[in-house]
Image (spheres, grey):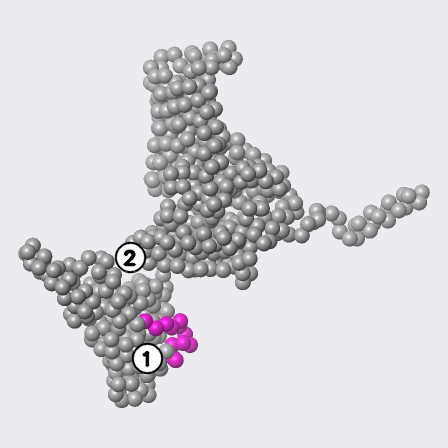
Amino acid sequence: MKWLNALLGKKNRTVKKELAEENGEDFTDSSLDISEREAAAKSLSLTKSLRENLKMIREITGAPGDLAIREFKTGREQVEIALLHLEGFIDNKLFENILRMLGLGSFQAPVGKGAGPNLLQEFRRRLLQSAEIKEVKTVDDLWNALTNGYSVILCHGSATGLACDTGDFRYRNVEEPSAETSIRGPRDGFIESFYTNIALIRKRIKTPNLWLEELTLGSLSRTKVGILYIKGLASEELVQEVRQRVSRIKTDAILESGYIEDFIEDNPFSVFPLTFQTERPDRVAGCLLEGRVAIVTENTPFVLVAPMDFPMLLQAPDDYYETMHIGTFLRVVRYLAFGASILLPGIYVAVITFHNELLQAQLLLRIAAAKEGVPFPVVAEVFLMELLFELLREAGLRLPRAIGPAISIVGALVLGDAAIRAGLVSPPVVIVVSLTAIASFTVPNFSFGIAGRLLRFIFILLGGAFGLFGVQFGALLVLIYTSSIRSFGYPYLAPMSPLILQSFKDLHLRIWRWRMDTRPLLLGGREPLRQARGQQPRPGIEEEEKEKAGKGRKNDH
């Protein structure tokens, strides 16, 4: 193990050996901690000895069962070579083609020290016709190539390996996103393949100005991350800010885009999401065309978009594919439903507890009669029923998809009816909680929906303690808080705060497409105009001429 002694130093190795002997353990390479093993893999260069190279690889990787190493001799001089790959990462047909080429070729390699390198050059020349080729010079480079679906050729006499792309990862097919369904619009969604997700975006934005910057995050996971933006449309300050926040992440693993979201958000204590996440390529394309930046992460179907603002959370893809009237109506309904999902239980508790005079006498008597015999105060009734519905909702999500929705619906009906019959809650409370649950389902963004559910419990307590004044005070605090937070330096409540009237075209209302001629002013960069103005629909040229001719004849008469 000369290579390991040289890497760690004799003193460090001696200390580790003494500690192992004191504990009655044998000192082996596996006793090295993870940082030292990572450093070993990154620092060790391949040698000209094939046997030494294979020995180093087995020592560093632990000779895993899925690492296949095929050794044989080839060429006129019968040079020793080895072909390495990881099971489950490669296309067997491509691998067999490479194996056939290596075993049957008659290569004109000279005798002596130049046989190995020249043989690799001959391999490169032949393989370039059918596969992507790159060189590997360290154990770390070699392992990265293997885990990305490459097969690596090592040749005795050469300190460089040849990696051939034979990857064939098994991903699920592109299908409709389960969390962001729509009635009208594209049905494709992101999957766990990094380059497939990039391709889905490029299908919609085919300009060469759609730039992709790739990074690798996670010292152990080595996850591929891409920063995607339209050059000249996204501001340089925004791109630089996103680049800096992502590149400064130092961790051992990035398993999902949520890991990155935690590292790059402006306010880690914010209950509201500060980075937009979506499974839909059309939504990402729309955000990029506004001047935003997308962050694509390997092994997850969720893409992050920055910066984001509050209106994005209540907008759905259908808003832009339907007519102006339908899109506006759906959006207004969504805003009202979101407000009801947060405030309705708290307002009910406040009115019943402190402000009975606001209700009609007959309605108040009916509510009082329904509550007769219930041992709990209204605030406790509503709070417990909300907790019950949250339990049912969570259970429905975690159960198998075939029975989850049925369990949620049946459980809510059975438990609600049983609670009323047992006199634990009153029927009006069940109605209010049910309406609140239905209203919360209209929120398109899942993370934002959870934030609203958390706020709902706070408003219930405020309504039970201070009445409508407590609810109003809580709403004011939420408004002040959301006005103060930012997403990548951009105001969260824009264009409402700061007030930008020109951007109201796509806020609570969704006006005609031909009137949405500018991008968001805070994001437009050097190209605030997205389309030509004056494109209001009108009759064709022939119909206009006929109309003018008809008017002329009327004027003559």
Q: Is residue 356 above or below residue 552?
A: above
Q: Nearer the viewer, residue 126 or 348?
A: 348
Q: Residue at x 52, y 31 (%)?
A: 336
Image quadrant occupied by the N terminus: bottom left
Circle 2/circle 1 CB separation < 8 Å: no
Q: Give the structural element (helix, strand or loop) at label 2.
A: loop
Any magenta on residue 112? no
Q: Nearer the viewer, residue 260 or 186?
A: 260
Q: Give the structural element (helix, strand or loop) at label 1.
A: helix
Image quadrant occupied by the C terminus: top right
Q: Is residue 92 above or below residue 256?
A: below
10 Å crowding of disc 1: few (<14), some (14-19), many (20+): many
Dot 2 or dot 1, earlier in sequence:
1
Q: Give the magenta part as a residue range.
A: 125-136
Does residue 460 show up? Answer: yes
Whole-Å distance between the Cαs marked 2 and 1? 30 Å
The amino acid type of the residue labelled 1 equals: Leu
* Residue at the far right in the pictured view: 557
* Residue at the far front in the pictured view: 11
Residue bearing the label numbered 1: 120
Where is residue 194? Give x, y as percent. Answer: 41, 58
The amino acid type of the residue labelled 2 equals: Leu
Residue bearing the label numbered 2: 220
- In which quarter of the view is residue 68 placed? bottom left
Q: Residue at x 30, y 72 (%)?
A: 137
Does residue 70 show up? Answer: no
- In which quarter of the view is residue 409 placed? top left
Where is residue 358? Give x, y as percent. Answer: 51, 15
